[in-house]
Image (spheres, rainbow, N blue to C red):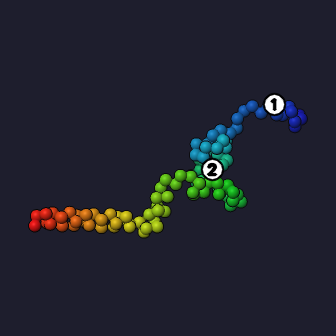
Amino acid sequence: MTKGTSSFGKRRNKTHTLCRRCGSKAYHLQKSTCGKCGYPAKRKRKYNWSAKAKRRNTTGTGRMRHLKIVYRRFRYSFHVWIIIAFVSLIKIISLTNWCKIRVLA
């Protein structure tokens, strides 16, 4: 058997398909594992020897639907907007009561 043209002719079966978790074409069909994220393992696959890969897949590269709200709330100690809303509501109520008293008198 030669290692060249005749060997390349035998390559017609797909070994990898799309991964459900990361979406890359690295899910090995016979091994039933993803070479990129490690699915179906519970923990995501990552190694310190690949700093670039960690940078590509770390927190902040996606949407961060929840975390961006948490970061914003952290800046104001998680409660400032509630206090401001409460104080403004009290001011509005006191002003309307003062106006009613003024009109009646």
Residue 24 in the figure: left or right of residue 96: right
Q: Earlier in the sequence, mark 1 or mark 2?
A: 1
Q: Residue at 47% x, 62% y: name it.
A: 72
Residue 31 seen: no
Q: Looking at the picture, which amino acid does disc 1 mark? A: Gly
Instruction: Judge by depth and name the residue closer to the eye, 45 or 74.
Output: 74
Residue 75 in the figure: left or right of residue 3: left
Which quarter of the rendered picture does the N terminus lie within?
top right
Instruction: Judge by depth and name the residue closer to the eye, 34 or 89.
Output: 89
The circle drawn on residue 37 is 2
Q: Residue at 49% x, 53% y: name it.
A: 65
Question: Quadrant of the rendered structure where residue 43 is?
Answer: bottom right
Residue 99 seen: yes
Q: Residue at 46% x, 58% y: name it.
A: 69
- CA separation, marks 1 and 2? 31 Å
Residue 31 position, x and y percent, is 66, 42
Instruction: Judge by depth and name the residue closer to the eye, 45 or 103.
Output: 103
Q: Is residue 41 above or below residue 90?
A: above
Q: Looking at the picture, which amino acid does disc 2 mark? A: Cys
Task: Give the residue number, with chain letter if any, for mark 1.
Answer: 9
Residue 58 position, x and y percent, is 60, 57
Evaluate if marks 1 and 2 touch, with contact meaning CB atoms under 8 Å apart.
no
Q: Residues within 10 Å of mark 1 (few under 14, many from 20)?
A: few
Question: Quadrant of the rendered structure where residue 96 is?
Answer: bottom left
Element marked by disc 1: loop
Residue 35 in the figure: left or right of residue 6: left
Report the residue that reaches farthest toward the bottom: 77
Q: Is residue 66 above or below residue 4?
A: below
Report the residue that reaches farthest toward the right: 2
